[in-house]
């Protein structure tokens, strides 16, 4: 059982933009370090670190100044103590970098206990889509073995628990000899002194307005089995149109990465309950990518088909002049409306950074794909969560990529609740 006078301390590996971490922070866990190889995501992590620090030290007005564009990012970061600046480690996890990462964590941690490790290695090597597109079924992809590197951190820090998140393709991904990576992972972590149990969770069952199925593995130090928590599914009472509430209407190419005032006439109990709208009267990143005239014509067809008949557009049903993709046999639903009248949207993935055809806004008058903020809301990120680029200049593409790769915050918080119960119990 943890001491009641201190927070549960964790390391977030392959942290991305910090969706998983954000859920744990909401439940009172304390991040010691975030490790992430993508520079833009590391800037997002630093900005969110500043958010939490300034809120705790009653200087939240400085964060608001940053969102409003009154101060630069460098000035925001200058407000952070050196320990917090160093807590975001921009490095690829692997044999060549692990010792440097260990040294940085040890410097920050100063001998303190690491109670928990969370994170999920990049999923492309395990994903069903990735394997289908690769002639070698991703069996030569080095990312298959990042679970081994994750194990190096378990071995080093000996946490009481770990949480490992990944795509459902992990169930079937195999090496060249036909051995499942999942079985190898469990065997490795048992050798390190941990039992590992798992199940599939769908974010839509826990208040996220998106179908997103993920394997959630939980490891516990020792030999106890049968410890995996029971997650209680919530009734689906809210529809996807909630993600659009309070946001101004945009046409393709409109919007701003900066400040966007809410519409005063709209409020949403769902957005307030899930802490997506959380006290500010504005948000950011409500910007839509431009679309060419052909795409907009297809969007109108797809929207009308769904809103009038509840039917999805099949790409092969378009007129020949509109069928410019060579592949006519797979991804025939590549133009897909985010249905406002369903309880959950299609899964938001990183491909949204390349085009928005799979995420068409349902309003035919706006006739566009989702804005960055709307995609973030589908992932249950709060409206004051700012997604950064590599440079000071904001990047719509980098923001979309981070959002598509993230763990929904609301799902992460549900997992954190169960882990917290374990620490209080044992």
Image: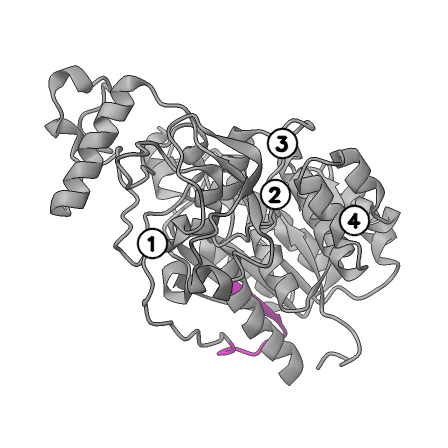
Marked residue nearer the N-terminal end (2 or 1): 1
- Mark 4 Cα within 10 Å, few/some/many (few <14, many 20+)? some
Report the residue at 50% width, 43% height from top.
403
Marked residue nearer the N-terminal end (4 or 3): 4
- Mark 2 Cα within 10 Å, few/some/many (few <14, many 20+)? many
Q: What is the x, y in percent for residue 318?
A: 13, 25
Marked residue nearer the N-terminal end (4 or 2): 4
Marked residue nearer the N-terminal end (1 or 3): 1
Residue at image mark 1 = 240
Residue at image mark 2 = 386
Report the residue at 75% width, 50% height from top.
61
Rendered image: mark on residue 102: 4
Q: Given contact means CB atoms under 8 Å apart, are the residues at marks 3 and 2 in contact?
A: no
* Measured Cα–Cα span from mark 4 to mark 2: 28 Å
Mark in the foreground, 1 or 3: 1
Residue at image mark 3 = 389
Q: Establish if 281 lies above or below 388.
A: below
Mark in the foreground, 4 or 2: 2
- Mark 3 Cα within 10 Å, few/some/many (few <14, many 20+)? many
* Measured Cα–Cα span from mark 4 to mark 3: 26 Å
């Amino acid at each position: 059982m943890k001491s009641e006078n201190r927070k549960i301390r964790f390391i977030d590996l392959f942290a991305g933009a910090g969706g998983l971490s954000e859920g744990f922070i909401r439940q009172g866990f304390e991040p010691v370090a975030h490790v992430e190889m993508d520079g833009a995501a590391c800037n997002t992590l630093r900005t969110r670190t500043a958010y939490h620090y300034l809120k705790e030290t009653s200087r939240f007005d400085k964060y608001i100044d940053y969102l409003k564009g009154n101060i630069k990012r460098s000035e925001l970061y200058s407000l952070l103590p050196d320990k917090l600046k160093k807590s975001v480690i921009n490095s690829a996890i692997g044999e060549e970098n692990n010792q440097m990462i260990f040294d940085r964590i040890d410097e920050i941690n100063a001998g303190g206990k690491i109670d928990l490790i969370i994170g999920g290695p990049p999923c492309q090597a395990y994903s069903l889509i990735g394997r289908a597109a690769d002639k070698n079924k991703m069996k030569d992809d080095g990312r298959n073995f990042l679970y081994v590197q994750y194990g190096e951190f378990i071995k080093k820090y000996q946490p009481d628990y770990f949480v490992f998140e990944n795509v459902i393709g992990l169930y079937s991904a195999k090496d060249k000899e036909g051995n499942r990576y999942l079985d190898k992972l469990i065997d490795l972590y048992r050798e390190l002194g941990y039992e590992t149990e798992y199940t599939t969770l769908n974010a839509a069952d826990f208040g996220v307005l998106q179908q997103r199925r993920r394997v959630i593995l939980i490891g516990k130090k020792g030999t106890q089995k049968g410890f995996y928590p029971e997650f209680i599914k919530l009734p689906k009472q809210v529809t996807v149109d909630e993600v659009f509430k309070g946001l101004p209407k945009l046409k393709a190419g409109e919007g701003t990465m900066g400040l966007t005032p809410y519409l005063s006439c709209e409020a949403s109990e769902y957005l307030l309950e899930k802490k997506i709208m959380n006290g500010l009267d504005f948000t950011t990143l409500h910007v839509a990518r431009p679309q060419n005239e052909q795409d907009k014509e297809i969007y109108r067809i797809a929207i009308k088909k769904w809103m009038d008949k509840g039917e999805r557009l099949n790409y092969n049903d378009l007129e020949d002049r509109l069928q410019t993709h060579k592949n006519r046999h797979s991804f025939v639903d590549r133009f897909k409306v985010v249905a406002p009248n369903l309880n959950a949207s299609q899964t938001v993935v990183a491909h949204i950074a390349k085009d928005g055809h799979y995420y068409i806004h349902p309003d035919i008058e706006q006739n566009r794909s989702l804005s960055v903020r709307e995609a973030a809301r589908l992932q249950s990120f709060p409206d004051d969560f700012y997604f950064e680029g590599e440079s000071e200049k904001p990047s719509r593409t980098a923001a979309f990529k981070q959002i598509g790769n993230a763990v929904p915050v609301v799902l992460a918080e549900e997992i954190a609740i169960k882990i917290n119960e374990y620490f209080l119990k044992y």
